[in-house]
Amino acid sequence: MAGHSKWANIQHRKGRQDAARSKLFSKLAKEITVAAKMGDPDPDKNPRLRLAVKEAKSQSVPKDVIDRAIKKSMGGDAENYDEIRYEGYGPNGVAVIVEAMTDNRNRTASTVRSTFSKYGGNLGETGSVSFMFERKGEIFYPLSVGDLEHVFEAALEAGAEDVEEADDGYYIITADTDLASVNNELEEALGESESAKLIWKPTTTTELDLEGMQKLMKLIDALEDDDDVQTVTTNFEASDEVLAQLT
């Protein structure tokens, strides 16, 4: 889907900033540590850890950072994190889902709530916007892997639900519980994927003009700047012309 690719490209451009990259590395390392602590420190025996490592590699996280994050999970001094989801509305009624890992629920809740308020949004109750999304698995391959027919056939054979072709590659959609198994099957057929992760896929979208997008980006940037926040997902839709003016 074009909108899918657009948001990925916005994130990519933002991610070139050194400070943003450093913060992203820290968040990905935290996910690796939590995944390893909850299961087995061997990625081959721990599907969540394997996917976390793959996502880190796709974002160019250095191998030594990944290895340190896994080793940290095996130490007695590793922090205990709670995984929390916050839901609310941003400017112009855009639905926003925030996923966080925190060692202090009160601190994180207070920060997230004040950030929503400061940037024209409202934090709601759990379930207030998630009904507008589906929890899915998403596997990404670049266009160089082959044509759409080839990828679609391999994806269906592996048990995927759909394939969305975009400007930068193929987004293969799976049931959330099938992500690891479909990714494994696809890697046998197409080679290693660039990314495999769980996402919130919007079932309904909110159209934004330039002013609306600018306001939304300020909210997203502020939320992502919080060390406790892992991901921010919205259901915005915007034209190519509007998105081009954001850069």
Image (cartoon, grey):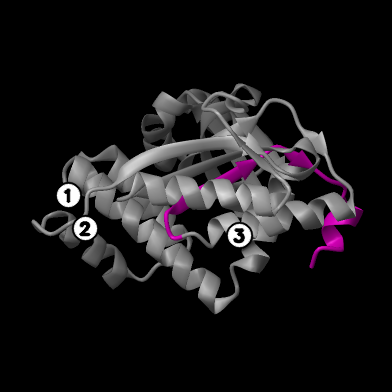
Q: Which residue is mark 3?
A: 222
Decide: is 133 above or below 4. above
Quadrant in which the C terminus is drawn: bottom right
84 inside magenta stretch = no
- In percent of the image, x 64 and y 67: which residue is there? 14
Q: Which residues are magenta?
A: 227-247
- Residue 160 located left or right of residue 146: left
Distance in Å between CA atoms under marks 1 and 3? 33 Å
Camera-nearest label, 2 or 3:
3
Rendering coords of residue 114 (x, y %)? 58, 51
Could you classify mark 1 by the number of other residues whose Cα lies within 10 Å: few (under 14), some (14-19), or many (20 or more)? many
Question: Of the residues under marks 1 and 3, which one precedes in the sequence?
Answer: 1
Rendering coords of residue 210 (x, y %)? 88, 54
Asked if disc 1 and disc 2 are in contact, CB closer than 8 Å, the reply is yes
Rendering coords of residue 111 (x, y %)? 50, 53
- In percent of the image, x 37 and y 34: which residue is there? 180
